[in-house]
Image: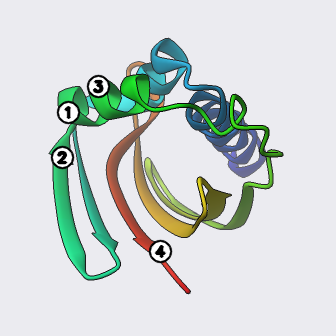
Amino acid sequence: MFTSNHKAIEKLIHNYFEGIFYGDIVKLKNCFHQNAILYGDIEGIDRIQNMEVYLEAVGKRQSPNDLGESLRMKIIGVDILGKTAMVKLHVPMLEYNYYDYLSLYKGKEGWKIVNKLYTHVN
């Protein structure tokens, strides 16, 4: 069970990375629970967003791919307990050095991101 859950989470995170990197809103939306909330601390500015606001922002910006960046995002750690998981990611893009903590829940539709905490580290 652990191996299948770990592989499913890796697939979800791969889709999350691609959604962000290529600006693929459909792929990105499918990674999240519809009621997910995102909390960020970017250079001392607090950001709190629901999914609608987040997806709109991603859709309006130039994607890292369009800007000629290489995909350097990676999984740092995964902790699975039953139908819940925490994932730590390094997400360098758009001249930021982001780190994400994603809370995941395994429901009827499989693993989904239910909460995203993110920050930029100099």
- Label 3 neighbour load within 10 Å: few <14, some 14-19, many 20+: few
Mark 3 or 2: the one toward you: 3
Characterize the local packing of mark 4: few (<14), some (14-19) or many (20 or more) Cα atoms within 10 angstroms: some
Q: Residue at x 69, y 28 (%)?
A: 66
**Comparing marks 4 and 2, which lies closer to the viewer?**
4
Image quadrant in which you'd find residue 27: top right
Tag 2 residue: 49
Cβ–Cβ under 8 Å for marks 4 and 2? no
Circle 1 residue = 53
Q: Residue 120 carries which label?
A: 4
Mark number displayed over residue 15: none
Indicate left or right for 103 with 82 as reference: left
Q: Dot 1: what SS?
A: helix
Compared to residue 15, the image places residue 85 above or below, namely below
Q: Name the residue that disc number 3 marks.
A: 56
Mark 4 or mark 1, which is nearer the start of the sequence?
1
Q: Are marks 1 and 3 in contact (CB under 8 Å)?
A: yes
Left or right, 37 with respect to 101, comes to left
Relative to residue 58, is residue 6 drawn left or right? Answer: right
Q: Between marks 1 and 4, how big is the CA–CA gap?
A: 19 Å
Q: Which residue is drawn at 59% across and 32% down?
A: 63
Which kind of residue does numbered mark 1 sit on?
A: Val
Mark closest to the chain's N terminus, 3 or 4: 3
Residue 46 pos. (x, y %): 18, 70
Badge 2 amino acid = Gln
Please provide percent x and percent y for residue 98. Answer: 54, 67
* Amino acid type for the residue under numbered disc 3: Glu
